Image (spheres, grey):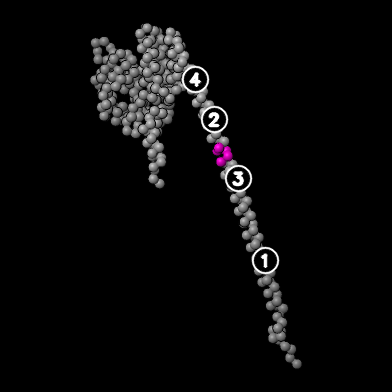
Amino acid sequence: MKLPDMEESGVAPPERNNKLARWYMLDLLVKGLGVILVSSAITFYGIRKDATNFETAERNRRAQILIETISSREQATADMRAKMFDTLVRNFFKDTTDDAARVAILEMIGSNFENDINLKPLFLRLNAELAAKGSKHQSELRDATRNIISTEVEQIVGSGGAVCEIELSVGETKQGACIAPITVTLRKVLDDSRVMVETGPLATGLSSVTYFDLPLMNNRPLGELRYALVLAEAKPEKGQEGRARLQLVRLPPAYYSVDNRLRVDQLISDLTLKKF
């Protein structure tokens, strides 16, 4: 009698059962690994996101602390400078008999507030008073002014500006080496502390240059640049035309003085209307 075939009888052979079992186990393993990987990825993403959020929050917190610290320091410095300026000016006008003290006070103001206020009128006034009295402190005032100007010129050159020297006789015209388009013509030497000049290329009439022109405040526009003229020496020389030695100071291209609202407005416009 012939035994029925195992497939015909509905019973799978052992080899097939083993294959099915292996595929089943492999399927379970793959699905299990998939679940583990997905869960791990979600967990890692959450941890990473929390860490990123924490780092961002920490950076923002530190930036806020830094901004508050700088703001507090700047406010404290501004308050101190305001009190200092008020005290110095009061003392300058309080006692007009102590010439040495007034020279020292004006030098302190010029050394600490060179970017905040145009001190040329005060220097001219004190110089005129000292000259009228024949005070020996007039030379000290000029020395103090030279010190302030020298410091300002060093700052300007160190920030990307330039300085060159021009020596002229009355009626002579020369070009500044550090600002090629600028020409300077010496028209008159009024005394040993003041001359009259005319600058080009666009002649704007005569202007005076004194020992008390401070380049950070007493400067002039030339297109996008600004420049200043500083009187280094004046020789009125009797019976002769006279000579003068001038410094031509080119301010850095990015210089925006506190009193130049037009340039500040232009800067704001450039930043806000820039097309990206």
Q: What residue appears at the point 52 percent right and 28 percent down from the top-left corner?
A: 75
Using residue 241 as the reference point, say whether residue 134 is left or right of it: right
The mark that comes first in sequence, 2 or 4, is 2
| Residue 54 locus on image (x, y percent) | 60, 45
Label 4 sits on residue: 84
> Which amino acid does the dot numbered 2 rest on?
Ser
The magenta region covers 60-64
| Residue 105 locus on image (x, y percent) | 45, 15
Element at label 4: helix
> Which amino acid does the dot numbered 1 rest on?
Leu
Real-space Cα separation, disc 3 to disc 1, in angstroms:
37 Å
Nearer to us: label 3 or label 4: 4
The mark that comes first in sequence, 3 or 4, is 3
Is residue 125 among the parts visible in the rendering?
Answer: yes
Element at label 1: helix
Looking at the image, which is closer to me, 78 or 214?
78
Nearer to us: label 4 or label 1: 4
Quadrant where the N terminus is found in the figure: bottom right
Looking at the image, which is closer to me, 179 or 191?
191
Label 3 sits on residue: 54
Q: Is the magenta stretch mostly helix, strand or loop?
A: helix
Using residue 221 as the reference point, say whether residue 47 is left or right of it: right
Mark carried by residue 70: none
Label 1 sits on residue: 29
Is residue 164 among the parts visible in the rendering?
Answer: no
Label 2 sits on residue: 72
